[in-house]
Image (cartoon, coloured by chain):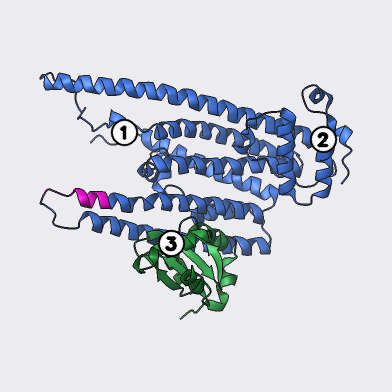
Amino acid sequence: MDKVMRLTTERGVVLFSKSSCCLCYAVKILFQELGVTPTIHEIDQDPEGREMERALMRLGCKAPVPAVFIGGKLVGSTNEVMSLHLGGGLIPLLRPYQAFC
Amino acid sequence: MDFPSTQFVPSRIMGTYQPIHQIGMWGENFKSIGNPSISASVIVEVDNKLENESETASHEMPAPSCKHDQEASKPFDKIQRRLAQNREAARKSRLRKKAYVQQLESSRLKLMQLEKELEQAREQGLYIGGGLEAGHLGFSGAVSPGIAVFEMEYKHWMQVQNRQLGELRTALNAQISDIELRIVVENGMSHYFELFRMKSTVAKADVFYVMSGTWKTSAERFFSWIGGFRPSELLKVLLAQLDPLTDQQIFEVCNLKQSCQQAEDALSQGMEKLQETVSATLAAGQLGQGTYFPQVAMAMEKLEALVCFVNQADHLRQETLQQMSHILTTRQAARGLLALGEYIQRLQDLSTLWATHPREPA
């Protein structure tokens, strides 16, 4: 889907979320703690939301949200983000985009 | 590494297993593979062929990874025996589970019948027993077989856990090779992963059951965080037990602890948000009018997310264990597992002591 592809290639950290999803909220909090402000797309508030959901699942996300892209590459859902973080691999990916006030 | 294939097959195996050329094949594979974890799965593959079993029993007890070793022929024997034991244990466990579920189902039907008779007797004005409020015990269909099976499996899990702790203690005191110690460590790790799988299954049946921690002792429940221990708390306990660590190891463990804490914070805040959401949904509209099914139905939908949180929390626990096993040496990992296991035993003993110590009469 064009819209999703375009959005994922945006620079920086992109998070596809739903405003009602509490697990998405947890991921947002994690990024906040790590000093990153992701570009958030709430697909439940998007008129093309259903299409976007399907597109995300086709890209390999088992649950459509949360879906995290960093620098245009799919990192994955909560599982992958947590594993990456505990393994020490998340912060290096985020470094270019970190901004601690 | 050189593995002359003929030396590998003890004669007692010859009678029941496939011809040697397959072992030769395995020996060739083992020679060329540098990655320990790949060679472990090769062992499992050949083992299945050897045993000629159609049952994929080994998936329940993943094969331990072994490091390359010049004199691997003795531990090979032990590895084979250990794998066979594991398979046997898994098979027996499945049979036990099947028998138990069948027994449960028939008991459940009997109970439903009894409750019906009770209700009929009550309606006829006969008072029977006290405290048996209709439906409160929830026997009519609400004794989830999933929970009953989990409780049985958990009891067995604890028995195996205690046995493994004994093995760890013995292994650490004896002069065993790193390969053999690695097997004991991998068994311990797999055992925890098995628990997470069990919890995931029962969480689908009743997530509140997992959250309440009724299957654990009271002192363990005191420390409960989303259905289990906080990984960062366990790391604190472990750190003190693992001296001496290299500077590099200390650095890595501290990073792990910090990442854990950040992940835990995120999940905790997500849980708070879930509570707020469920509460708001439930309280929507006017309270006091007496009709509220839509709110309850919607709240139930929101609650589904709780299963995801429980799974995420267990995933965090599993990842923490994995990462620690990468950072530590085999010996340190063995000591760590033993320390963890004994810490939990102390908590359980605390619960027992607390339950039995004399108190002031009310």
Q: Amino acid at mark 2?
A: Ile
Marks 2 & 3 on one chain: no
Tell me if mark 2 has few (under 14), some (14-19) or many (20+) residues whose alpha carbon lies within 10 angstroms of its own: many
Specify whether residue B260 is in view: no
| Mark 2 chain | B
| Mark 1 chain | B
Q: CA distance from mark 3 to mark 1?
A: 35 Å
* Residue tagged 3: A53
* Residue tagged 2: B23
Q: Identify the colour of chain B in the image.
A: blue
* Residue tagged 1: B142
**Whether residue B326 is situated above or below residue B122 in the rendered picture:** below
Tell me if mark 1 has few (under 14), some (14-19) or many (20+) residues whose alpha carbon lies within 10 angstroms of its own: few
Identify the image quadrant of residue B351.
top left
Residue at the far bottom: name it: A101
Q: Would residue B14 appear left or right of A35 to someone viewing this image?
A: right
State which chain is coloured green.
Answer: A
Give yes or no for contact between labels 2 and 1 (Cβ–Cβ under 8 Å).
no
The stretch in magenta equals B290-298
Identify the image quadrant of residue A22.
bottom left
